[in-house]
Image (spheres, rainbow, N blue to C red):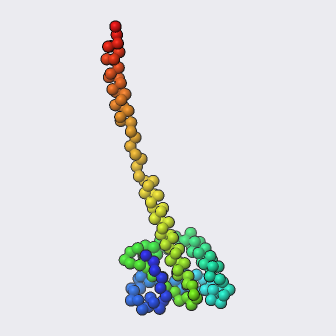
């Protein structure tokens, strides 16, 4: 599971550091979920609307996922082993990108499970072909035919 917290909430939560990842570009600019700082500043001063930021950020995550999928799968694995993974940041705006990051990862998790299910179905062996009873019928015909022919002789 993936949850989102403000950094202040996380600081007071008593969560172990291994369960918390800060995705603020000011604190952790190298994180795969951190947007560029100037995007957040544009959001704050009104140059970017939230829908526009949302669009750009999701596009950014998709292209990062294409380039380095294993970094995203590592986050998913961390969110499945030993409790929830908590994403935090210091956004001062009404909306925060951490909610979009959580949506993206959960979408990825659902898709990965769908891909896994398809693979399992494909690996299933084909059902056995039902030719045995037909062989039996052919044999019965061969055995019965001479007797039948004989009894018809005058
Ligand atoms: Zn944020």
Residue lying farthest right?
Answer: 47
The residue shown at (40%, 40%) is: 129
The residue shown at (39%, 85%) is: 16
Q: Nearer the viewer, residue 27 or 92?
A: 92
In the rendered image, is residue 9 in sight? yes
x and y percentages locating residue 61 in the rendered image: 57, 74
x and y percentages locating residue 110 in the rendered image: 48, 67
Query: In the picture provided, is 56 more to the left or to the right than 143?
Result: right
The residue shown at (45%, 57%) is: 119
Q: Residue 56: name its quadrant.
A: bottom right
Query: In the picture provided, is 93 more to the left or to the right than 109?
Result: right
In the rendered image, is residue 38 in sight? no
Residue lying farthest top?
Answer: 154
Quadrant location of the C terminus in the rendered image: top left
Q: Residue 30: name its quadrant.
A: bottom right
* Position above or below: 126 against 9: above
* Position above or below: 130 against 141: below
The image shows a total of numbered marks equal to: 0
* Position above or below: 75 against 128: below
x and y percentages locating residue 115 in the rendered image: 48, 61
x and y percentages locating residue 1 in the rendered image: 43, 76
The residue shown at (55%, 71%) is: 65
Q: Residue 85: name its quadrant.
A: bottom left
Q: Nearer the viewer, residue 59 or 153?
A: 153
């Amino acid at each position: 599971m993936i949850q989102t917290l403000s950094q202040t909430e996380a600081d007071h939560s008593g969560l172990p550091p291994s369960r918390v990842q800060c995705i603020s570009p000011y604190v952790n600019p190298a994180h795969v979920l951190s947007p560029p700082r100037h995007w957040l500043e544009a959001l704050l001063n009104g140059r970017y609307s939230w829908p526009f930021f949302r669009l750009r950020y999701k596009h950014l995550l998709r292209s990062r996922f294409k380039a380095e999928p294993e970094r995203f799968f590592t986050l998913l694995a961390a969110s499945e082993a030993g409790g929830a993974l908590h994403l935090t940041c210091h956004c001062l705006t009404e909306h925060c990108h951490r909610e979009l990051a959580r949506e993206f990862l959960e979408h990825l998790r659902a898709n990965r499970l769908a891909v896994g299910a398809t693979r399992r179905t494909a690996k299933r062996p084909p059902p056995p072909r039902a030719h045995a009873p037909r062989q039996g019928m052919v044999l019965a015909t061969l055995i019965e035919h001479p007797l039948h022919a004989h009894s018809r002789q005058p």
